[in-house]
Amino acid sequence: MAGRESSARDDRARGTDGARRTTTAGARRTGSPRAGDRRTGTSPAADRRPARTAAAAVAPAPGDGLVVGDLPGAARAVGVLLVLSGLAGVAALLPTYLVVGGRELALAGGLGGALVGLVVPLTAVAVGAGLAAGRVPRFGLAYAGVGGALALGSLLIEVYRGSTSTVRPGIEVLAGERVLTSSVQTGGGWWLQVAALALTVVAGVLAAASWNRTVMEDRGALDPARPGLAGAAVVLGVLTVLCLALPAADVPDRIVADPSTGLEVVVEQQGPQALLERPGLALLGGLLLAGAVLLGSVLAPSLRPRLAAVGGFLAVAVTVLAAGLGGLRDAVASDELDWTVPGAGLLAAGLAYGLLTVLAWRLRRTPA
């Protein structure tokens, strides 16, 4: 009897050891945590998962990472004003602009004049339509703000031409014609041009008021290139102001031979007045225009996001380019006028501003 009880105890002990070995082997096959892992409550796979999640969280977003918020109604109104100003500028090319000394002048003045006159209005229509539709709003607001500052000086110059230029008559180049402002009457083209400039000024004021309420941001891809763009823009701004101070197309000096002595004498002819030589509103407008060019050159590279800087550069580029092309048109259309070095410099500055616009659009380097 005692032998049988001892044998049963041995069998039970062997069964318990076998079950323990079977449980351990099953745990190994099913990948149960080791003793050290059981103490911490983690596994090697769980240790690797947070690392992959953190790496995915800091991965850069594709493209600019542009974020655009809800567009306020004032920003859409700016777009509508830009479209209206552009349409008014296009319509101003066809009717009579001014009647100076009995001569009717039109801004178009032929195919070349029409093409030059379309540069600024068509750009305003394109930018304004995009802004009214809610696309890249700070691009349109930057264009409107800088363009409005530039249009203010031009507006005062236009008012001077149509109202007070006869107070101090002088030689002017209007619509490619060299005229004496002894008597001036305004036409429909002048009124439309004034309306276009006034709408642009109002759009610029409204754009500045709605800038902070418009949400648009990116990853700062242009930030490393902003100092270089700012330096180039300031140099171009100074060059542009120097070129604006002198006529883009002027009357050349005449060489006259003295019949008694046979000597040739250079006779100076009165040409168009320089921008800062005009009185009253024209002088104030010239000063405001020069200041706006410098201000736009300084402000545009600092605007955020990148597309806002593109909009600021575009406003300066089309304004300066239109002025340079206008001087070239005047020299080509009139036999009495020659293209001047300041006129060539103005055209070169406009093209350089266009290059800065393209660079601000294309440069997308990752910030440090």
Image (spheres, rainbow, N blue to C red):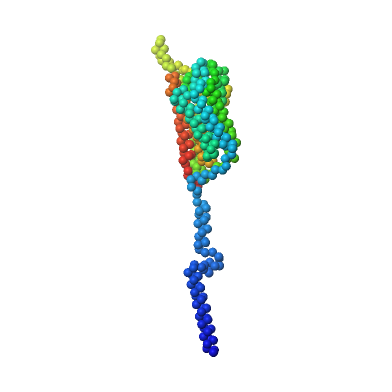
Foreground of the two, 131 or 343: 131
165 left or right of 340 in image: right
Which residue is located at x 52 percent, y 88 percent?
3
Image height check: is 91 above or below 357? above
Which image quadrant is residue 256 in? top left
Q: Is residue 162 visible?
A: yes
Q: Nearer the viewer, residue 261 or 192?
A: 192
Q: Residue furthest bottom?
A: 1
Give the residue displayed 50% in from the left and 34% down from the top: 126
Q: Residue at x 46, y 27 (%)?
A: 115
Q: Which quadrant holds the N terminus?
A: bottom right
- Locate residue 30, reporting x and y percent: 49, 68
Q: Quadrant of residue 282?
A: top right
Side of 177 where 212 appears, left or right: right
Q: Is residue 311 above or below residue 170?
A: below
Query: Where 227 sits versus 26, above or below?
Result: above
Residue 329 visible in this rendered orientation of the protein: no
Number of residue marks: 0
Residue that protrudes farthest toward the left in the picture: 262
On the image, the x and y values in percent for residue 164 come to: 57, 20
* Residue 314 in picture, x, y percent from top left: 50, 34
Residue in view at x 51 percent, y 40 percent: 307
Q: Nearer the viewer, residue 211 or 365?
A: 211
x, y percentage for residue 215?
57, 42
